[in-house]
Amino acid sequence: MHSDLPIYKATYDLLLAIFQFVKDFSKEYKYSVGDAMKKETMELMTLIYRANTHSDRRKTLLDARERLEVIRLYVRLMKDL
């Protein structure tokens, strides 16, 4: 089952951490960058599910990798701000 995968569990933990992190953002970033971070992480979880349930995983995994890079960029941006 996809929810038993270590990567799925780690992504869920990341989503929880982002929710905790975003609640302390200023209003300026909470509803723009914060919501985008949540959305990207949810999309990453969806792609992990998709990759686990389809036989042709290459494109899905490439999309997931791209989402992860976007999330990393948001986290780095928020750290620097």
Image (cartoon, rainbow, N blue to C red):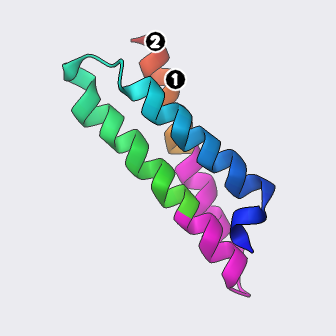
45 to the left or right of 33: right
- SS label for mark 1: helix
Numbered label attached to residue 80: 2
Q: Residue at x 62, y 71 (%)?
A: 49
- The answer to whether residue 22 is magenta is no
- The image quadrant where one finds the N terminus is bottom right
Q: Check disc 1: other Cα within 10 Å, few if <14, some if 14-19, many if 20+.
A: few
Mark 2 residue type:
Asp
Magenta highlight: main SS:
helix
Q: Residue at x 23, y 34 (%)?
A: 31
Q: Residue at x 71, y 70 (%)?
A: 2
Which residue ends up furthest to the bottom in the rendered image? 55
Numbered label attached to residue 45: none
As rendered, which of 19 and 72 lies closer to the eye? 19
Q: Position of residue 59 (x, y in %)?
A: 63, 74
Q: Position of residue 29 (x, y in %)?
A: 27, 24
Numbered label attached to residue 76: 1
64 to the left or right of 31: right
Write the start and end of the magenta stretch as one range: 46-68
Q: Position of residue 37 (x, y in %)?
A: 41, 40
Mark 1 residue type:
Arg
As rendered, which of 53 and 57 lies closer to the eye? 53
Q: Residue at x 61, y 75 (%)?
A: 50
- SS label for mark 2: helix
As rendered, which of 21 and 29 lies closer to the eye? 21
- State which quadrant residue 36 falls in: top left
Asked if the residue under mark 2 is in contact with the one under mark 1, i.e. CB atoms within 8 Å, the reply is yes
Marks 1/2: CA distance? 6 Å
Look at the picture and state if 81 lies above or below 17. above
- The answer to whether residue 59 is magenta is yes
Q: Check disc 2: other Cα within 10 Å, few if <14, some if 14-19, many if 20+.
A: few
